[in-house]
Image (spheres, rainbow, N blue to C red):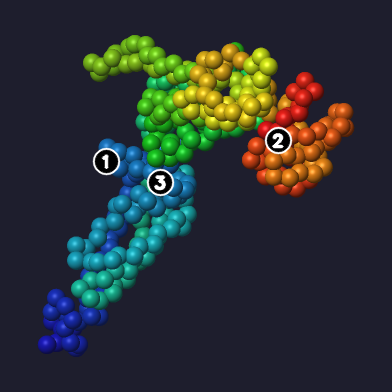
Amino acid sequence: MLCLRCGKREQFADNICEQCLMDTVHPVKTQPVVHGTVCPTCNRILKGRSWDECAGEVSDAACQVALLSLIKHEDIRFPEIELSVDNYSGNVFRISGHARSNYKGVFLENDLSTEVRLSLAQCPFCSKRSGNYFEAILQIRGLEGLSEDEIEKLLNHINDSTEKIHLKDPNVFISRFEKVRGGYDFYMGENSFTKQMAQKLHDTYGGEAKWSSSLFGRKGGRDIYRHTYLVRLPGFVVGDYLIREEDTLKVIKIARRIMVRSLKTSRDEALDHAVAMEMRKMKKNEIEVDLVIISHDDTEIQVLHPTTFVTTVLLLEGRKPEGETIKGALIEGDLYLV
Ligand SMILES: [Zn+2]
Ligand SMILES: [Zn+2]
């Protein structure tokens, strides 16, 4: 059967030939002017009543708005669409591109061109954040026992974890951060994340944790609470030492209880957080020394005493020395392996 339109070629689909399909079917159409709303802070695009994420810059948002406005023929399959900004003036973007799609077995291509006019409006997440909104306060205390590096690591951890979750849930953010007496306060945009964070910090660092809430006001018939999560660190980290009368204890694990190992007896025991927190604390670098190995067998090692330079014999207690030195501790003149 010949094409009903041109009468020259065989029919391909819709009673017309392939060439006539290309001439008459518009698989993807643009509108001459499209309006869109974009958040200038986070580049989210208003789509209906929700704000959709858009990676990149405002020109990417303009392309995304153009893409959302395209009218696609209902019979096309696998459309491949490319759009780019030709030029812009203020918030008006000239956008052009190309579409390639499969229509009933024939590939159709067409050029696209449109103008996108953007209006800028802060999305609700960014306006919350910039308005210093907060639902919870995370209070970190008990930093006295931590080195500058350890404190920085802890603060970075809070910032980075919040930023990471913020990408998935824009309600999660730090709206304010304050150095206060004895520690730091983080004013947090969202409550449940803050609670999880406080719980995790407590699990990692140990110490004491206290949660409290206070009625802040009412909104839309609901009571609004503000929550405070106090995490008081124990003043030591794994690897530090606790001093108890005649013995020195190395902190080997922090969990529901504090696991410590006696330097004198090499025995492990578990302490309550409150008990451990009362003890005198010493940092690893205040106590640990590299001891020069003179000789050793399977059970004993001879090392050079770092201050008297006397050869000292210590029990290995299962340790396997490697290299020329071994970690030890010097406490009131006495040497121990750690
Ligand atoms: Zn034809
Ligand atoms: Zn925003």
Which numbered disc, 2 or 3, marks the residue that appears first in the sequence?
3
Whether residue 165 is visible, yes or no, is yes
Residue 308's spot in the image, x, y percent? 87, 28
Which numbered disc, 3 or 1, marks the residue that appears first in the sequence?
1
Tell me the CA gap for discs 3 and 1: 15 Å
Is 161 on the left-hand or right-hand side of 250?
Answer: left
Within 8 Å of ligand 2, the CB of disc 2? no
Residue drawn at x 28%, y 63% as measured from the top left:
28
Q: Which quadrant holds residue 210?
A: top left
The residue that mark 1 highlights is: 48
Mark 2 in CB contact with mark 3 (< 8 angstroms): no
The residue that mark 3 highlights is: 54
Please identify, in this view, whether the residue under mark 3 or under mark 1 is nearer the observer. Answer: 3
The residue that mark 2 highlights is: 315
Which numbered disc, 2 or 1, marks the residue that appears first in the sequence?
1
Residue 2's spot in the image, x, y percent? 14, 87
Whether residue 143 is visible, yes or no, is no
Q: Nearer the viewer, residue 312 or 146?
A: 312
Residue type, numbered disc 1: Gly
Secondary structure at badge 1 equals loop
The crowd level at tag 1 (other Cα within 10 Å; few <14, some 14-19, many 20+) is few
* 250 vs 320: above or below: above
Residue type, numbered disc 3: Cys
Residue 71's spot in the image, x, y percent? 25, 57
* 223 vs 71: above or below: above
Residue drawn at x 76%, y 44% as measured from the top left:
296
The N terminus, quarter of image: bottom left
Residue type, numbered disc 2: Leu
